[in-house]
Image (cartoon, grey):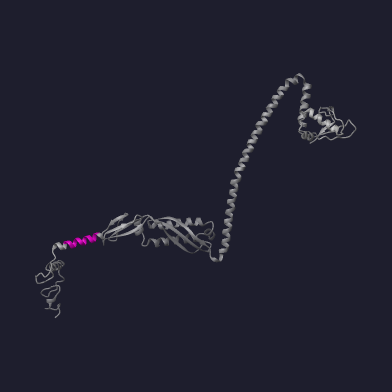
Amino acid sequence: MAWNEPGGNKNDPWKNRGGKDQGPPDIDDVLKNLFGKFGKGGSGSGKTSGPSFTGKTLGIILVIIALVYGASGFYTIKEAERGVILRFGEFHSLAQPGLQWKFTFIDRVIPVNIQSVRDQASSGSMLTEDENVVNIEMEVQYQVINPEQWVFAVEDPERSLSQAFDSAIRYVVGHSRMDEVLTDGKEVARQRVLEELISIIEPYKMGVDLVELNFTNARPPEQVRAAFDDAIAAQEDEERFIREAEAYAREIEPRARAQVNRMNEEAQAYKERSILEAQGEVARFEELLPQYEAAPEVTRQRIYLETMEAVYSNTTKVMIDTEGSGNMMYLPLDKIMERQNLRPSDTRNFNNTLQGLQNQGGDTLTSPQIQTSRNTSSRSGRN
């Protein structure tokens, strides 16, 4: 007869009496029966056949369990990390670096590195605004600044950041021309991608800070690479010529400024010299004025002679004798005086030179024949 049939309740595990369905016994009764068996040494006859478990033994067991539980709660957070503590799956607090403790089976700690700079790469073939295909490879570097937002803002922050990065690149490349992305507009495109990425992830509050964003590679398709290489080479030559021109300008400008300063100084010196010479001439004429008033004719003749002497001393002179036999004698007086190291005022040396010329067979020339007065018509000078 089964235990659950009427009258067969002798083997009923729930100890139901009277055949009535009373349900499972109270949990307290089960525990009392269990501890009672431990207290009797596991024998139902009431006789002790081994060592009995007392309340002291039970206390030791509980203490051991408590020590094991307490030791299992210790953990360490590194210097570069912060621990996000979850209590029953909900954010509770942040754990600082060092030795920490948590409630085992209650708290969960997620360490997040906030000092290291992470990187995320993206690449692919993209269509530009002028309907050309370019191969772009870019890399973004970022750093976690808010561990709580990094863990709870989105389900998978790294995957979400990668998708946002791809979206920003494709948007910017799709609104740019091919030559702008591959040549001189690369820096502008990089800045636009960075701004677009910031605008995408800002509403999600992912707790990251974008450190740097760079083009690792940007190239055209293989079919047109040669033409673009030539264009890039021409651009580099243009930049080199501009730098050379700027270097030449920096080199020539100081020399031009020095030349201008020198010319200004020379002009200033000429001005001062001219003023001083004019003042000297005025002073000389003021000194001659009393002499001219005393003897006008003599003073006038002397001034004329001195003036002619000053003029002819700096010019090439040719002397012609028309009173003799009609033969013309050419005397390069300046060359003769230069060779003999003579001055026009050195009369003795000058006469010796004339005497030497006469001894060589020339016509006799005397001082009256070399006249510098106003009425002399037998001498003419030319340069």
Residue ID at (78%, 22%): 298
Q: Position of residue 249 (x, y in %)?
A: 60, 47
At 68% from the left and 31% from the top, the residue drawn is 274
Q: Residue furthest top?
A: 294
* Residue 61 forms part of the magenta stretch: yes
Q: Quadrant of residue 105?
A: bottom left
**Picture coordinates of residue 41 (x, y %)?**
12, 69
Q: Looking at the image, is 281 positioned above or below residue 62?
A: above
Q: Is residue 41 above or below residue 350?
A: below
**x, y percentage for residue 178?**
53, 61
Badge count: 0
Relative depth, front residue between 235 and 75: 75
Name above or below for residue 269 compared with residue 43: above
Please report the bounds of the magenta region as a residue range. 59-70
Task: Tell whether 126 sits left or right of 58.
Answer: right
Q: Quadrant of the N terminus?
A: bottom left
Q: Residue 177 or 309: which is nearer the viewer?
A: 309
Q: Furthest-bottom residue in view?
A: 1
Residue 153 figure quarter: bottom left
Q: Write down the quadrant of residue 348 in the picture.
A: top right
Q: Quadrant of the C terminus?
A: top right
- Extreme-left residue of the structure: 46
From the viewer's perspective, is 170 left or right of 26?
Answer: right
Q: Is residue 252 visible?
A: yes
Q: Is residue 107 magenta?
A: no
Residue 315 seen in render: no
* Horizontal side, residue 164 vs residue 73: left or right: right
Would you say 87 lies left or right of 234 here? left
Position of 290 relative to 248 (above/below): above
Task: Pick whichever, 232 or 24, lies toward us.
Answer: 232
Residue 176: x and y in percent read 51, 59
